[in-house]
Amino acid sequence: MNVRFETTGCRLNQIESESAARSFLEKNFKVIISPLASRSPADEDTVLCVINTCAVTQKAEQKDRRIIRLVLEKCPRAAVIVTGCYAQLSSKDINAMDERIACLPGQLKSRLSEVPELLKKMLEAGNFNAVAFAKELNGGIFVRETEKKGFSENAFRLSTDSFLAHSRSSIKIQDGCNNNCTYCTINIARGHSVSLDVQTVIDRVVQLEKAGQAEVVFTSVNIGQYRGKYGDSYLDFSHLLELCLKNTSRIAMRISSLYPEVVDDYFCKVISDPRVRPHFHISVQSGSDFVLSSMARRYKACDVIEACRKLKAVKENPFLACDIITGFPGETAEDFEKSLELCRDCGFAWVHVFPFSARPGTVAASMKNKVPQSVSGERASRLSAWASESKKNYIASYTGKTLRAVVETVKKPKLLSAAAGATEYHAVTENFLHCCISVPAGFKAPLPGSEVTVRILGEIQEGVKKGGEVDCFAEFV
């Protein structure tokens, strides 16, 4: 019997979905990770669909609802579990969509690991019914014990060191957030900050190295709030990373995202190790101090600039990226120009641009001086166009040069006009360039997850413009 997983949003969601999928595999279910397309035929063999959702913007929630409706249509026999941040914030609306739906709030997501055994028992008894199964979940493990005093859920219960759809291993070391940024629902959807203890992180990194993994990605909601227990004390992320490096010898380490205040002198000393990838994504949101203050961010534009200066001093030509929100309430044309100027000053190779999206329950949703969507969208378009040019320039700075890379996927030729029998490879370089590589028939295939050396040949124009899966051509060296 098939169990299908659909995942939207951040890499944390992807890790949690992969971990839950592993628990179904262990009970001998066939797991499908690839997204369901609107033109796909109805899947009669799927008995359960798990949709792990995001709620960072209105568009994200719209995508969640679209996927839920598509799954209900294409998998008519399946019960549907909706979990993640959207499920945490809008459970009543989700449950009202269909009686086959069981809504699992995101903060209880770890309970997915209990579902395979329940599903297996119902199937073996010969009385599986999607509606009955959804009702059993909604009235059972999805609500059990949550009203008890002192209740606490293990945010790190969903973990795996082997991945079905990703070749680069990831470890979730921190979840939740203690900040109260005026536009954000993460502290509501994921709760207060919690951290995985230091020794567990070290042990898992050591195990990944022994298993032959070339790279591990440390993921979190706010890595600056990492405080992992270590003996009788607690360590921050810089000290955790230092210990992971000291206890291993080969595996490379990548950091998923940073806040500017993390980048102090000690952090820079630790990341000077060549095994720390020269790729850093900084949570910025605006280049205007006025807007940053309105967002309740705890730094100023000059702190972002200083963080980028330090990163460039310790890593040669690193890939620096950031998030920017356009059209935040009260943002003037001058404020937006400061964001654009900040991106130029920092030399960001890429910018994830989000037009402001008012989230119910946040302070920003009731702020005055709203910026019209047309203005917010126009500013987002301008910044996105700049980001595309910046990435092109960054790729050009590496064209003809060789880089280490981790092989991700093997596909039939799509982007290259390859000869008959050729294979298309995707790989992610140490500095986060996403390469497309075509090789002739008979070429000895590198295994997904293995580290190779590639030479950058040039940009993929549409990939850069759309922020797609791949952004440059390369060849194996």
Image (tube, rainbow, N blue to C red):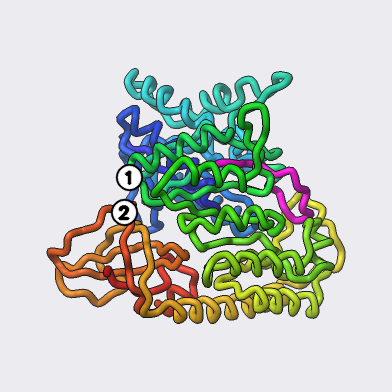
Judged from this view, the residue extending furthest toward the right is 368
Please identify the quarter of the rendering in which residue 306 is found.
bottom right
**Residue 227 visible from this viewpoint:** yes
- Inspect this view and state whether residue 90 appears: no
Residue 293 place in picture, x, y as percent: 83, 61
The residue drawn where x is 47% and y is 38% is 80
The residue range painted magenta reads 173-186
The reply to whether discs 1 and 2 touch (Cβ–Cβ < 8 Å) is yes
Q: Is residue 181 magenta?
A: yes
Q: Quadrant of the N terminus?
A: top left
The quarter of the image holding the C terminus is bottom left
Q: Is residue 176 above or below residue 336?
A: above
> Label 1 sits on what residue type?
Gly
Q: Residue at x 17, y 60 (%)?
A: 444
Q: Nearer the viewer, residue 14 or 142?
A: 14
Q: Which residue is mark 2?
A: 450
Q: Nearer the viewer, residue 94 or 233?
A: 233
